[in-house]
Amino acid sequence: MCDKVSLWANGDFYVELDHKAGVMDSSKNWIVPIEFDEVVQIRLNNERYPVMFRGYKVMRNGRWGLYAEGRQKIPAKYRQLMIMEVWSFNWYKAQNENGSWCLLDENGKKISDTYEEMGTYSAIVDRMAVKNKGKWGFVDSKGKVQIACKYAEVQEFHYVNGLSLVKDGNRSFYVDCSGTEYYAN
C-alpha cells in the first residue's frame, strides 16, 4: 500500500512509500526508483514550444540530481540544480557543497570553471554573469569565458540593445557581448 499516488500530466504516477518517492508509468514500471526524498517533474512551457518533458529532478539527503532516459544522469549531490534549456540542448546550473557554482551538460559533465556566483542567463546574447575572485565577467552556454571577470558589478544584458551596464571602481559604462566597452561622452 502506497502513502500517496498522484497522476502527473504526462501520464506518469508520482508515488510515495515510507517517506521515499519515485515515479511509475501506467504499466506499473518504475521510471524513477522509489529511493529519493523528493522527485520533481521537469517540464518546459513556453510560447515557442509546446510542453516538453525533460526528466525528473531528484533529491536525496537534501541534495539534487537528475533522473532521465531511465537512469540517473546527474548524481544527487548538488545543493541546487537548475535547468537552463536553450531550444536544442539542456544544460544545468549547479551549486556545489561549498556554495560555489558551475555549469553541467545534460549528462552531468562539468562544462565550466567553478565560480563564487552565477547570474541569470540571457539567451538573446548567450551570456551569463559569473563572479570569480570578487570580480564579474560573462560565460556562454558552453561554459566558455567570453568576457573576463574584471568588473565590480554587472547587470544582465538588455534584451533590446544587447548591452550590459557594468561598474569598475567609480566608473559605470556599457559592454556588449563581445566585451567592447562603451563610455558616455
Image: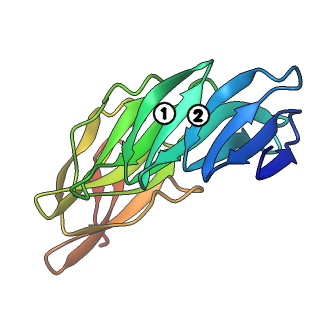
Tally of numbered tags: 2
Q: Quadrant of the C terminus?
A: bottom left
Spot occupied by residue 117 in the image (x, y as percentages of width and height): 29, 59
Question: What is the crowding at mark 1: few (fewer than 14 residues within 10 Å), some, or many (at least 20)?
Answer: many
Spatial CA span between label 1 and label 2: 8 Å
- Using the image as rendered, state which of residue 135 and residue 101 is in the foreground: 101
Query: Dot 1 corresponds to which residue?
Result: 91
- From the viewer's perspective, is residue 143 above or below residue 89? below
Query: Dot 2 corresponds to which residue?
Result: 86
Secondary element at tag 1:
strand
Q: Amino acid at mark 2?
A: Val
Residue displayed at 36% across by 38% down: 103
Direction from residue 175 to residue 90 in the image, left or right: right
Residue displayed at 45% across by 22% down: 107
Q: Quadrant of residue 171?
A: bottom left
- For the rendered model, the colour scheme is rainbow
Spot occupied by residue 82 in the image (x, y as percentages of width and height): 50, 48
Residue displayed at 69% across by 25% down: 31
Between disc 1 and disc 2, whose residue precedes? Answer: 2
Tell which tag, 1 or 2, sits nearer the viewer: 1
Spot occupied by residue 112 in the image (x, y as percentages of width and height): 28, 35
- From the viewer's perspective, is residue 110 above or below residue 156? above
Q: Quadrant of residue 52?
A: top right
- Using the image as rendered, state which of residue 64 and residue 166 is in the foreground: 64
Are the residues at dot 1 and dot 2 in contact (C-beta closer than 8 Å)? yes
- Using the image as rendered, state which of residue 20 and residue 174 is in the foreground: 20
Which residue is the extreme one toward the left?
Answer: 133
- Using the image as rendered, state which of residue 144 and residue 68 is in the foreground: 68
